[in-house]
Amino acid sequence: MITFKNVSKTYEDGTTAVQSFNLEIKEGEFFVLIGPSGCGKTTTLKMINRLHNVTNGDILIDGKSISDHNIHELRWNIGYVLQQIALFPHMTIEENISIVPELKSWKKSDISKRVDELLELVGLEPSTYKKRKPSELSGGQQQRVGVARALAANPPIILMDEPFSALDPLSREQLQQDFLSLKKKIQKTIVFVTHDMNEALTLGDRICLMKEGEAVQVGTPEEFVNKPKNDFVKSFIGNRRSVLQKTIEELIEDLIIGSSETPFREVDSKLTLGELLAFLADEEAVTIMQANQPLGVLCRKDVLRFLHEHSGEGGLVS
């Protein structure tokens, strides 16, 4: 879907932000770029829609160089969600979401229908919210509108630049949970930048950890937890690695195990928390089994809450 071929980016002052970068992002994949400040992750993201131009190498979308695309059409076909949200304050929510469909000359009736569909998709009642101005919404609600606007013209690719990082912890946790469900519904290729390893492990199908403009390791959340490539990767994951390698059995007193009559997918209690995250990427909840007997139901939202409650600047405590 998106291919980086030996891509480098050097600014006019001589600073090299990205160097010799090679990467293949698959169609329909939720791909996370992560790394310390100044590692080049946002520059890498912005080169995809040509907000930053490539200095050397090439980026291809479905085999076609981005330099061969009309720049306006390229951006109309790539949704973009920013940390700052950047809704137009003088426009209603409906008008904000309608911008790209209007530029693409959609019929007014189709635009109106699309706005209602998208507001419902992101959990905002259309009749309540579409005539409001951004200032009348909370930060979390504004970010939901930002996601709806990015999806408005049904683009195949969505770029998200630290979209939840400015939110309070509760709003951020809720949006992460909702986005796990949303990503299955929208079936898009999503490239997501974050500095939060919890967020990367929770949301990503695959992760690219960057350092000084280069890709240090690319892999699934489970590969990062269980097979870190070097000491830098181990250090970046920090104490998260120790708790994610603990089994459900070891953490049973700290996790919220409930009851339910709904039949959920069964997983063994000897799975590690890291392995459990892989199941919960596609499931709302799982039934925990011990010695072939059901212990109870573990919900995705409770696992995410556990991760957040045990996180801090030093990572998750063991």
Image (cartoon, rainbow, N blue to C red):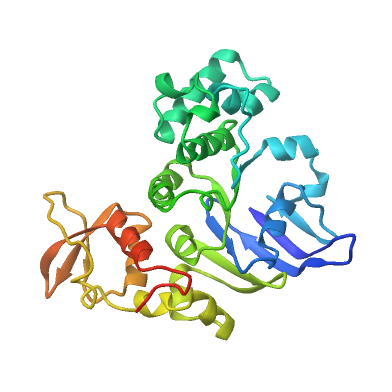
Q: Which residue is drawn at 36% across and 65% down?
A: 307
Question: How many tags in the picture?
Answer: 0
Residue 78 x %, y %: 65, 41
Residue 275 picture location, percent across and down: 35, 70
Residue 63 appearing in the image:
no
Instruction: Pick the residue in front: 130 or 291.
Output: 130
Q: Is residue 94 left or right of residue 297?
A: right
- Residue 310 place in picture, x, y as percent: 35, 68
Whole-percent x, y for residue 135 in the image:
53, 29
For this rendering, which residue is in front, 186 or 34? 34
Instruction: Relative to 169, say whether 97 is above or below.
Output: above
Q: Residue furthest bottom?
A: 231
Image position of 18 with respect to 241: above or below: above
At 76% from the left edge and 47% from the top edge, which residue is drawn?
51
Q: Residue at x 55, y 37 (%)?
A: 146
Horizontal relation, residue 6 to residue 264: left or right = right
Please state, as top left, top right, bottom left or bottom right, where the C terminus lies in the image.
bottom left
Q: In this view, does 50 lie to the left or right of 135?
A: right
Residue 174 seen = yes
Q: Quadrant of residue 283?
A: bottom left
In this rendered view, identify the residue nearer to me: 133 or 56.
133
Q: Quadrant of residue 39?
A: bottom right
Name the residue: 63% across, 29% down: 88
